């Protein structure tokens, strides 16, 4: 057995050989055979070794989470997202987590077919009926299946707005480059016009000068 473990509940941490673990509830952490510095609340843990993990509730059994003191709390940092089996974290942007990196190019053109909508969530979701602005996951899935996240039944559940934002940025940059090219061409054409205008003015001045110059008539003697 490990050291400095705290177990409250029927056979909580019964099989643990690790240290500094906390388990609360019947069978809490009972699957964990090894691992240190874990916290299990109403969760049996994993058969495989893990360290420094916090597991609360059972995936598929507990379907809602309510934590006070978050909604109106001001904080700076990265948005938290929900990953596989309820794991909380932030979206990773470093190249060390990525592979097959390549320019987005025309892939972002899919967003041009999206149809933003206004709506209200149903009363059981938002009793206040606050006006909302966004997209409908099922419609987005028809445009590009990669732009939605799906539930455990494989149905479109929510839109990956982070991906949509990245596509918007790519389309903006493409249009910005077009504008820059148009401005460069316009500046080049303006310079050409100014050069031609200067040339015409010079020729016109020479013609005026030749008209005003005295004419010399040579008579044959």
Image (spheres, grey):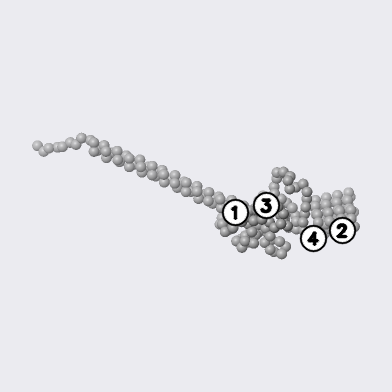
Q: Are the two marked residues, 2 and 1, in contact with CB atoms closer than 8 angstroms? A: no
Q: Closer to the camera: disc 1 or disc 3?
A: 3
For the N terminus, the image quarter is bottom right
Where 105 sits versus 186, above or below?
A: below
x 71%, y 54%: residue: 126
Find residue 36 and report its horizontal and vertical position in percent: 83, 51
In primary-sequence order, the first of circles 2 and 4 is 2
x 32%, y 40%: residue: 201
Identify the secondary structure beneath mark 1: helix
Q: CA distance from mark 2 to mark 3?
A: 42 Å
Q: Which residue is mark 2?
A: 27
Query: Could you tell me if residue 101 is visible in this image?
Result: no
Q: Residues within 10 Å of mark 1 (few under 14, many from 20)?
A: many
For residue 167, the mark is 1
In the image, 198: left or right of 87?
left
In primary-sequence order, the first of circles 2 and 1 is 2
Identify the secondary structure beneath mark 3: loop
In primary-sequence order, the first of circles 4 and 1 is 4
In primary-sequence order, the first of circles 2 and 3 is 2
Quarter of image, res 122 = bottom right
Q: Which residue is mark 3?
A: 130
């Amino acid at each position: 057995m490990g050291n400095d473990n705290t177990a409250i509940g029927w056979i909580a941490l019964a099989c643990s050989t690790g240290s500094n673990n906390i388990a609360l509830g019947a069978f809490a952490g009972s699957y964990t055979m090894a691992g240190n510095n874990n916290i299990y609340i109403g969760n049996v843990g994993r058969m495989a070794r893990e360290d420094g993990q916090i597991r609360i509730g059972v995936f598929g059994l507990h379907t809602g989470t309510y934590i006070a003191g978050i909604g109106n709390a001001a904080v700076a940092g990265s948005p938290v997202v929900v990953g596989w089996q309820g794991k909380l974290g932030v979206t990773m942007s470093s190249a060390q987590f990525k592979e097959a990196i390549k320019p987005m190019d025309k892939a972002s053109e899919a967003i041009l077919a999206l149809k933003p909508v206004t709506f209200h969530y149903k009363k059981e979701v938002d009793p206040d009926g606050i006006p909302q602005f966004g997209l409908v996951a099922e419609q987005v899935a028809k445009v590009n299946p990669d732009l939605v996240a799906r539930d455990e039944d494989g149905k479109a559940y929510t839109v990956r707005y982070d991906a949509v934002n990245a596509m918007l940025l790519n389309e903006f940059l493409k249009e910005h480059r077009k504008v820059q090219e148009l401005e460069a061409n316009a500046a080049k054409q303006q310079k050409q016009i100014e050069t031609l205008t200067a040339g015409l003015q010079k020729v016109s001045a020479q013609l005026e000068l030749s008209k005003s110059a005295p004419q010399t008539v040579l008579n044959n003697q």
